[in-house]
Image (cartoon, rainbow, N blue to C red):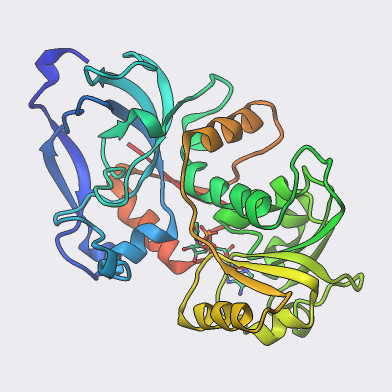
Amino acid sequence: MVSSDMGKLMHCLQYDSYGGGSASLKHVQVRLPTPKKNEVLLKLEATTINPIDWKIQKGLLRAIFLPRHFPHIPCTDVAGEIVEVGPQVKKFEVGDKVLAKLTHQYGGGLAEFAVASESLTVARPNEVSAAEAAALPIAALTAHDALTEIAGVKLDGTGQPKNILITAASGGVGHYAVQLAKLGNTHVTATCGARNIDFVKGLGADEVLDYRTPEGAALRSPSGRKYDAVIHCTTGIPWSTFDSNLTENGKVVDLTPDLSSLTTFALKKLTFSKKQLVPYIVSVKSEGLEYLVQLVKNGKLKTVMDSKFSLRKAEDAWAKSIDGHATGKIIVEP
Ligand SMILES: NC(=O)c1ccc[n+]([C@@H]2O[C@H](COP(=O)([O-])OP(=O)(O)OC[C@H]3O[C@@H](n4cnc5c(N)ncnc54)[C@H](OP(=O)(O)O)[C@@H]3O)[C@@H](O)[C@H]2O)c1
C-alpha cells in the first residue's frame, strides 16, 4: 500500500453495545487500521458471517470478554489482497491474495480493510475465489477438526469404516462436514429440511432424513445403522435421542455446547460411559486452512453459497444468518 493511503477512511459496519440484532449495525467511516509488526493489512474482497459473530453481539460470550471493546466491527473470516505488511512479516508481500482468520476479540471483517496476523493468514490460489476462501476458516475447519480429531475419520480413506451422522447438514458447517466425511471411509447419514434433501445428497450423503418428520427427529438411520460419531451442528436434541442410535463407543461431537450438554458430558465421564458427548470449540490454525484451501483448489471440497450481499446491505446478511435457515454460507462483499 502506498503511504499516502495512511489515515484514509474506510466504510465499515459496527455496533456500540450488546443486543439489537441487524438494526444495531451502523454504517460508519473509520480510519484504516494500521498493521502491527506481525500483521498484514488486507483490502477485503469477501467476508462470511458465522453464528458466533451474532452470538457475540447478543452478549452470549461476555463472560470471556467478547468483544474486547465497543464499538466493534464484527466478523472474522475474510479474503482479500495484502496492501501493507508489518515490518516483521516474512511470508507475504504486497499484492498477495490471501484468506485469513481475524480474532473474535477485535473482529474487523465487515469493512473495506482489515488487519490480520501473519500466523492466521494463508495464500489463496487463483483457482479459489475470494468468496469460496472467506467461507472456509471457522465453518470448514470445525467440520474438519471434529471429523478427524474427535470422530477419528481419516480423510485419505485409509481408516476403519465408520458410520457418521451429521445434523443440520445443509448449513455452513454441515455442508462441509458431509463432503469431508465422504473423503474418508464412511457411510454418512444427514439431517436437513425437506427442501434441502437433494442438495445434501448431492454433497455425497448416503442417506438423508428430514428433521421435521418423526424418523428425522428420532435420528433413525433408514438402513438401520448405528453411528460411530455424530457431528452435531444444531441444537435441541436430547441425549436420550442420540443414545439409542450410537454404537457401543459412539461419540456425539456437540458444536453448540450448553448447560445441558455440559452436564451430560460430565455425567458420562463420571460414570465411565463408553458412549460420550464431546463439547467442541474449534481452534483455527494456518495448517488447517492451508489444507482446506488445497482441497478446494483440487476440486475435492466446495463452498456452497447461500447468498451474497454487498457491504452496503450487510445488515441483511446479518439478519439472514440470525434467521438460521441458510443453505451453505452467507457472504458479504465490499
Ligand atoms: N464449536 C465450534 O467451534 C463451532 C464452529 C462453528 C459453528 N458452531 C455452531 O454450530 C452451529 C451451526 O453453525 P452453522 O454455521 O452451520 O449454522 P447455519 O449455517 O446458520 O445453519 C443453518 C442450517 O441449519 C439447518 N437446521 C436448523 N435446525 C435444524 C435441525 N433441527 N435439524 C437439521 N437442520 C437444521 C437449517 O435448515 P432449514 O433452513 O431447513 O431449517 C439451515 O440450513 C451454530 O450453533 C454455530 O454457532 C460451532
Q: Quadrant of the N terminus?
A: top left
Direction from residue 91 to residue 329 in the image, left or right = right
- Looking at the image, which residue is at 71% across and 84% down? 241
Q: Is residue 250 above or below residue 306?
A: below
Q: Is residue 142 visible?
A: yes
Where 252 falls versus 122 (above or below)? below
| Camera-nearest residue between 96 and 141 | 141
Viewer-proximal residue among 142 and 300: 142
- Nearer to us in this view, 289 or 38: 38
- Rendered residue at 84%/48% (across/down): 185
- Which residue is at 12% across, 14% downward? 3
Q: Assign the C terminus to one quadrant of the image.
A: top left
Q: Is residue 321 left or right of residue 271?
A: left
User: In the picture provided, is 50 more to the left or to the right than 264?
Assistant: left
Q: Vertically, is 217 above or below 209?
A: below
Determine which quarter of the picture holds residue 273.
bottom right
Q: Nearer the viewer, residue 198 or 91?
A: 91
Q: Position of residue 197 (x, y in %)?
A: 74, 62
Q: From what the image shows, is residue 278 above or below residue 110?
A: below
Residue 323 at x, y percent in the picture: 45, 68
